[in-house]
Amino acid sequence: MSDANQSPPPDEPAAPESEAPSQAMPKSLPWLGWLRDFWLVLGFFTRLPVVSVTGHLGEAARAFPLAGLVVGLIGAFVYFVAMEIGLSGLLAALLAVAATGIVTGALHEDGWADVCDALGARGGVEKRLEILRDSRLGSFGGLALIFATSIKVAAIANLGAPELVAGALVAAHTLARGVLPLVMARMTLARSNGLAADAGRSTQSAANWSLIIALLIAVLVVAPIAALVALLAALAATWAVAKLAQKKFGGYTGDVLGAVEQVAEMAILINLVTLT
């Protein structure tokens, strides 16, 4: 017979229920969740040695801007060092762009090039998706890489002052990654396998958090009005690439996300130059 329903003797008060763990967990778990998402996203978006964590990238999408913050700071640091040792603004800008590409393994640049190769090919949706799977670089992809690199280097060199460049790089990399969860939440997958499918869909809540965090970081490093204009530029770029991807590919892929990031980054830098 179970004694679960037996009451304790009258002279022995019942042991109080342990509430401490349940009270402490809600306070700590949200921060642990954010930390887990940060390490997961940073490990995916960069080649930096980070703490190994498991999870779905789509569920951690709210932390995308934080990875952009790290990448932007690395680019800003390289630019600052290059200027300090007497290099020209153009060469410093080139080194900064190269540094951000190296630290990310050119992940987004690769997607941008693949998308441009696929868009430049003749054929239907299946043909374009087949080209996206091809790791070889075509002529359209090569031209796209030259174009994107030139735009970014020219914009950074035009800003000139290290403090302006630092703010622009952080804002650009943060906002350009901050809009990606919006695509992952709103668009359909173009295929059931591949990098985007493995990452998983995002949620509107994660997309909202990502945009809020990206904007807050941008406001801290550039003028508030410039940060807002940069966000609008990123959203416009995202909408344009997403509409094109839906029409040409039937949805989004990992390469499409890379293209969104690159177009958004270019749009942000161009707008920041015009506002400086």
Image (cartoon, helix red, strand yellow):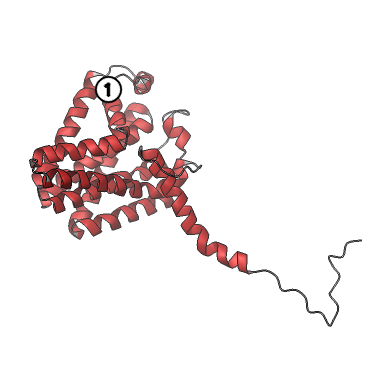
* Mark 1 crowdedness (10 Å alpha carbons): few <14, some 14-19, many ≥20: many
Q: Is residue 202 visible?
A: no
**Residue 104 versus residue 226: which sits nearer the camera?**
104
Residue at left offset 83%, top offset 65%: 4
Is residue 99 positioned above or below 13 on the image?
above
Q: x%, y% of residue 90?
A: 9, 38
Q: x%, y% of residue 130?
A: 38, 19
Label 1: element kind: helix
Among the 4 quarters of the image, the one containing residue 92: top left
Q: Is residue 111 visible?
A: yes
**Residue 258 versus residue 220: which sits nearer the camera?**
220
- Read off the residue under disc 1: 117
Q: Is residue 5 left or right of residue 250?
A: right
Q: x%, y% of residue 172?
A: 23, 46
Residue at left offset 24%, top offset 49%: 170
Quadrant of the rendering where the N terminus is positioned: bottom right
**Residue 275 versus residue 21: which sits nearer the camera?**
21
Instruction: Specify the farthest residue to the front.
Output: 85
Q: Is residue 104 left or right of residue 166?
A: right
**How many numbered circles are shown?**
1
Q: Is residue 22 left or right of residue 100?
A: right
Is residue 143 positioned above or below 79 on the image?
above
Q: x%, y% of residue 191?
A: 44, 28
Residue at left offset 40%, top offset 50%: 62
Residue at left offset 86%, top offset 78%: 9
Instruction: Specify the farthest residue to the right.
Output: 1
Q: Which three-letter amino acid code belongs to the residue tagged 1?
A: Asp
